C-alpha cells in the first residue's frame, strides 16, 4: 500500500475537529483508496470497526440509493445503534439527489465525524463545498508524486533501486513518469497506458463536461481543450483562445470563459495567475494552465508537438501545489519567473529548463532571478547532472528536486 503520507498528515491533524472533511480531485486519482487508508488509521488508533460506516455509492449494495430519504434510512438506522462517536464515509455522494440536506443534518449531531468524496458528471469536484452550509475543510488530492510512483512500483514488485537518484533505473522510471503520469490506473495498465489515458481523458470531457453542460459544439470545445494541452506553461487567456478561433464566429468570449472554468473545475487543468514583482500586484487577464496529470500531454499530442521543457515545468508545478505551495508566475521588468512559491510564510523562486547547455540558456534562466533583490531562496531546475549554481542561485537536478526538496527543507 502506498501510504500517501502527505494527505494522511493533513487528515489526521483534522480528525477530531468538528468539520466535514471533503476529499476532491480528478477521476481515478485514489480518493476511494484514501478512504481505506483513513479507516485503517482509525482502527489502528482504537476505533472499533462497528463504529465506522462506509457507503460507496458505486458498489452493488449501495448503488440503488438515489434519494436522500433512501440514504437516511441506512444512516439513521446505523446511528440509532451507536451512542458513542461514529465515523461516516460517503464515496461518490453526488449520486444521491439532495445529498447536502442529509449531510448537513448528520453534521449537526454531536457524535458524527463525516468524510465525503464526490466528482464527475453530476457534480464537479470543486463544487462540493458550495452545497454545505456547515463547517468543512477540503483536501485536494493529486496523482502520485514521483516518490509515490516509485513506492507504487515497489508494491507491484518492481523494487526500483533508490540509492542514487541518477542511476539508470531511476532515470528510466522518471522517463515513464514523465510520459505517462502518476495516476494509479495508468501505472497498472502496463502495455495499455496510452489507451487508458485516452479513455480517462475522453470520459472527463464527455461525461463531466459535455453531457452535464449540454455543450452542443463538441468539436469546438475539443479544439479549445487541445489548445490548452498544446500550450501548457504558455501565457493564455480567453482573448488568446478567441483570437485562435476567430474564424469560428459562433463562439463568444463568455462561452470560452465558461469552457475554461469547466475544465478547471473538472480537475483536468490548473490555472496560475501572474504577479508583478516590482509593483507587487496581480496581473489580470493572462494566466498559465497546467495539466493535473502530465500523462495527458503525450496521450493527446503528436510527438512533433512535444515540448519537453514545458512538460518538465508541468511536473514541477504539480509537485509545488501538491505540497501546499501557493504559486504564481512572476514578472520583473521584461522578464518572467516560472514560479513564485509561498508556503508557511516563506517564499522562494524557481526557474525550470530542460538543459543549460549554452551560455544563452543560462543567461535566460538565471538573469530574471538575479534581478530580484530580496533574500529569499532562488533555484534553477534542469536535467543537467553538472552543478551550475552561481551568484547565490542554487541549481538542482529535477529528479533530485522531486525526490528530496520537500523532504529535507
Image (cartoon, grey):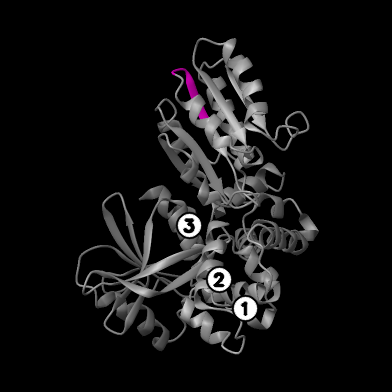
Mark 2 touches mark 1? (CB < 8 Å): yes
**Disc 1, SS:** loop
Mark toward the start of the polypeptide (1 vs 3):
1
Q: Quadrant of residue 228?
A: bottom right
Q: Residue at x 42, y 72 (%)?
A: 287
Mark 1 touches mark 3? (CB < 8 Å): no
Which residue is disc 2 drawn over? 311
Q: Position of residue 317 (x, y in %)?
A: 46, 63
Mark toward the start of the polypeptide (3 vs 2):
2
**Disc 2, SS:** helix
Q: Residue at x 38, y 61 (%)?
A: 327
Which residue is disc 1 drawn over? 306
Q: Position of residue 145 (x, y in %)?
A: 54, 53
Decide: is 28 above or below 363: above
Magenta stretch: give its range. 110-114
**Disc 3, SS:** helix
Which residue is disc 3 drawn over? 319
Left or right of 53 on screen, residue 343: left
Q: Residue at x 30, y 49 (%)?
A: 344
Amino acid at each position: 500500500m502506498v501510504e500517501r503520507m502527505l494527505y494522511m498528515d493533513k487528515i489526521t491533524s483534522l480528525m477530531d475537529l468538528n468539520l466535514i472533511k471533503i476529499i476532491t480531485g480528478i477521476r481515478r486519482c485514489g480518493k476511494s483508496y484514501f478512504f481505506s487508508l483513513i479507516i485503517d488509521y482509525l482502527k489502528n488508533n482504537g476505533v472499533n470497526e462497528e463504529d465506522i460506516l462506509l457507503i460507496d455509492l458505486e458498489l452493488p449494495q449501495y448503488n440503488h440509493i438515489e434519494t436522500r430519504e433512501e440514504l437516511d434510512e441506512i444512516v439513521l438506522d446505523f446511528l440509532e445503534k451507536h451512542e458513542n462517536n461514529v465515523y461516516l464515509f460517503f464515496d461518490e455522494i453526488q449520486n444521491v439527489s439532495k445529498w447536502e440536506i442529509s449531510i448537513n443534518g448528520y453534521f449537526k449531531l454531536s457524535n458524527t465525524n463525516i468524510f465525503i468524496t464526490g466528482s464527475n458528471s453530476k457534480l464537479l469536484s470543486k463544487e462540493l463545498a458550495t452545497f454545505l452550509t456547515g463547517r468543512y475543510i477540503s483536501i485536494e488530492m493529486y496523482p502520485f508524486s514521483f516518490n509515490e510512483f516509485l513506492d507504487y512500483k515497489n508494491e507491484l514488485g518492481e523494487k526500483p533501486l533508490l540509492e542514487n537518484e541518477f542511476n539508470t533505473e531511476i532515470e528510466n522510471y522518471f522517463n515513464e513518469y514523465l510520459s505517462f503520469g502518476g495516476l494509479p490506473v495508468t501505472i497498472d495498465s502496463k502495455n495499455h497506458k496510452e489507451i487508458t489515458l485516452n479513455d480517462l481523458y475522453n470520459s472527463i470531457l464527455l461525461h463531466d463536461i459535455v453531457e452535464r453542460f449540454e455543450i452542443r459544439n463538441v468539436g469546438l470545445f475539443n479544439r479549445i481543450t487541445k489548445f490548452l494541452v498544446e500550450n501548457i506553461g504558455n501565457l493564455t487567456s480567453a482573448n488568446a483562445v478567441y483570437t485562435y478561433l476567430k474564424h469560428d464566429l459562433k463562439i463568444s468570449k463568455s462561452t470560452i470563459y465558461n469552457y475554461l472554468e469547466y475544465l478547471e473545475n473538472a480537475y483536468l487543468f490548473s490555472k496560475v495567475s501572474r504577479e508583478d514583482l516590482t509593483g507587487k500586484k496581480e496581473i489580470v487577464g493572462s494566466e498559465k494552465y497546467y495539466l493535473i496529470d502530465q500523462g495527458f500531454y503525450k496521450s493527446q499530442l503528436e510527438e512533433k508537438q512535444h515540448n519537453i521543457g514545458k512538460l518538465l515545468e508541468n511536473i514541477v508545478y504539480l509537485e509545488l501545489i501538491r505540497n501546499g505551495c501557493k504559486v504564481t508566475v512572476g514578472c520583473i521588468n521584461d522578464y518572467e519567473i516560472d514560479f513564485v512559491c509561498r508556503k508557511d510564510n516563506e517564499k522562494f523562486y524557481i526557474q525550470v529548463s530542460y538543459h543549460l547547455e549554452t551560455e544563452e540558456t543560462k543567461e535566460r534562466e538565471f538573469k530574471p532571478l538575479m534581478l530580484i533583490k530580496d533574500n529569499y531562496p532562488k533555484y534553477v531546475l534542469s536535467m543537467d547532472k553538472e552543478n551550475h549554481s552561481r551568484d547565490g542561485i542554487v541549481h538542482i537536478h529535477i529528479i533530485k528536486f522531486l525526490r528530496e526538496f520537500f523532504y529535507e527543507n
